[in-house]
Image: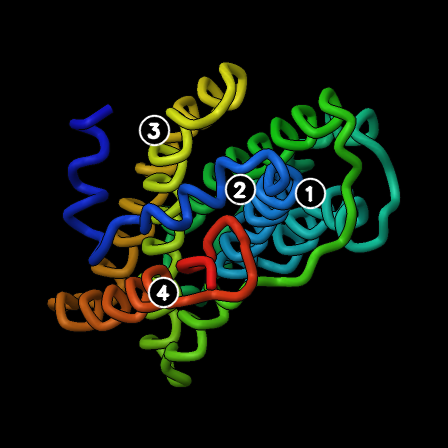
């Protein structure tokens, strides 16, 4: 695990504060922690899907991707369906084809489709844990974390895409770091679950960063460091709203 996490700690500009860990391991915060984690898995899938739909695939492929995500979005945003309805939904109805004029080729599609599949599987796993514990899903407000990163994204291409990929790398890396921090303080089931997520989350951050570097075609170290400082500030500053990616509890 330490070998897996070493690049994560080198990439992030700060570790999760002890005060967040103290709050996260309190039994009264478990419902919020699991609920927000589940929603974060869906948002990660949505982000990856948005990237390939906007930049890389033809209309038929775009429609197939939307249909793939729809049952999960119906469950979260419209409260339609149940865990049984989602049991066999994590599959694409067709091959995803690049659009002819896209400069972003198969590598973007392949990495993001695999990421979506894994994030939706994690979504289902969290929902299953909640169901088994009698924790009903309820709507919660969004935290400040992702918005705090995205508001600094440039508004012209290809910098918009590059910045969003860098943000994706930080979100995935922080998720991986938090799973590792949380695991020792959780019960046996959650401990094993969080440890099981580390490898895929670590690869997700690397995939995002690799794509950003490939698309930029030049050194992006300065831009990566820029977002690293913003991310660290969001994680280490006081935050009145406890969430999976929130800062120090105020």
Whole-angstrom CA distance, mark 4 to mark 2, is: 21 Å
Eyeballing the image, is 153 above or below 32? below
Q: Would residue 242 appear left or right of 81 to someone viewing this image?
A: left
Q: Which residue is mark 3?
A: 199
Residue 164 placement (x, y as % from top left):
39, 66
Residue 136 placement (x, y as % from top left):
79, 36
- Local packing at callout 4 (Cα closer than 10 Å; few below 14, some 14-19, many 20+) is few
Residue 89 placement (x, y as % from top left):
72, 31
The mark closer to the camera, 3 or 1, is: 3
Q: Which residue is mark 1?
A: 68
**Nearer the observer, 226 or 90:** 226
Whole-angstrom CA distance, mark 3 to mark 2, is: 15 Å
Can residue 28 be seen in the rendering of this structure? Answer: yes
Eyeballing the image, is 13 above or below 193? below
Label 3 element class: helix
Q: Are marks 3 and 1 in contact (CB under 8 Å)?
A: no
- Local packing at callout 3 (Cα closer than 10 Å; few below 14, some 14-19, many 20+) is few
**Nearer the observer, 53 or 47:** 47
Can residue 162 be seen in the rendering of this structure? Answer: no
Q: Which residue is mark 4?
A: 103
Q: Quadrant of residue 59?
A: bottom right
Q: Are marks 1 and 2 in contact (CB under 8 Å)?
A: yes
Q: Are marks 3 and 2 in contact (CB under 8 Å)?
A: no
Q: Earlier in the sequence, mark 4 or mark 2?
A: 4
The mark closer to the camera, 4 or 3, is: 3
Q: Which residue is mark 2?
A: 116
Eyeballing the image, is 164 above or below 18? below
Label 1 element class: helix
- Local packing at callout 2 (Cα closer than 10 Å; few below 14, some 14-19, many 20+) is many
Q: Earlier in the sequence, mark 3 or mark 2?
A: 2
């Amino acid at each position: 695990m330490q070998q897996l996490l070493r690049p994560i700690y080198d990439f992030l500009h700060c570790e999760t504060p002890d005060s967040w860990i103290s709050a996260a391991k309190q039994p009264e915060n478990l419902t919020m922690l699991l609920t927000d984690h589940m929603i974060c898995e869906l948002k990660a899938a949505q982000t990856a899907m948005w990237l390939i739909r906007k930049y890389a695939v033809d209309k038929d492929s775009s429609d197939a991707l939307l249909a793939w995500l729809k049952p999960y979005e119906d469950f979260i945003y419209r409260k339609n369906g149940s865990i049984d309805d989602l049991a066999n939904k994590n599959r694409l109805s067709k091959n995803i084809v690049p659009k002819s004029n896209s400069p972003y080729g198969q590598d973007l599609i392949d990495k993001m489709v695999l990421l979506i599949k894994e994030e939706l599987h994690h979504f289902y796993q969290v929902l299953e844990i909640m169901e088994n514990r009698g924790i009903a899903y309820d709507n919660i407000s969004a935290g400040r974390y992702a918005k705090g990163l995205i508001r600094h994204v440039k508004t012209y291409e290809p910098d918009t895409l590059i910045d969003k990929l860098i943000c994706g790398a930080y979100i995935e890396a922080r998720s991986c770091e938090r799973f590792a921090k949380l695991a020792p303080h959780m019960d046996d089931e959650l401990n094993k679950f969080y440890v099981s997520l580390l490898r895929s989350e670590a690869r997700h951050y690397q995939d995002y960063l690799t794509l950003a570097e490939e698309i930029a075609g030049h050194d992006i170290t300065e831009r990566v460091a820029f977002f690293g400082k913003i991310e660290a500030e969001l994680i280490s500053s006081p935050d009145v709203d406890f969430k999976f990616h929130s800062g120090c509890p105020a």
